[in-house]
Amino acid sequence: MQGEWIMPKEQRTLTKACKLEGLRLAETSGKSISEITRDLGVNDSAIQQWEKWKKEGDLKQERGVIGIVSG
């Protein structure tokens, strides 16, 4: 909308351990990806991105800045 400002989402850096736990939950918990990302407070694409980085051998804390889902 014209003339309307949108505030950027707050961002945080997640540890490698937190990302690995999210991936483990996605594989074993029986929960949907949406449920897991909501529980972790990250956007829905986060787990897919972490999986990609894990496969590339590049899953680390510095690459983990993910927008927090509000609401």
Image (cartoon, grey):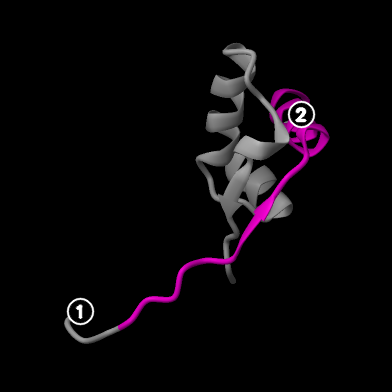
Magenta span: 5-28
Label of residue 24 in the image: none
Residue depicted at x 54% and y 30%: 48
Q: Residues within 10 Å of mark 2 (few under 14, many from 20)?
A: some
Q: Is residue 69 magenta?
A: no
Question: Spatial distance from mark 1 to mark 2, Cα to Cα?
Answer: 39 Å
Residue depicted at x 76% and y 28%: 20
Tell me where residue 27 appears, x and y as whole percent: 71, 23
Whichever of callouts 1 and 2 sits on the residue coming sooner in the sequence is: 1
Residue depicted at x 21% and y 86%: 3
Tell me where residue 16 appears, x and y as whole percent: 77, 33
- State the residue in front, 45 or 30: 45
Disc 1 + disc 2, Cβ < 8 Å: no
- State the residue in front, 29 or 60: 60
**Residue linked to disc 2:** 20
Label of residue 1 in the image: 1
Tell me where residue 69 appears, x and y as whole percent: 57, 61
Quadrant in the picture for the N terminus: bottom left
Residue depicted at x 60% and y 34%: 47
Which amino acid type is shown beneath numbered disc 1?
Answer: Met
- State the residue in front, 34 or 42: 42
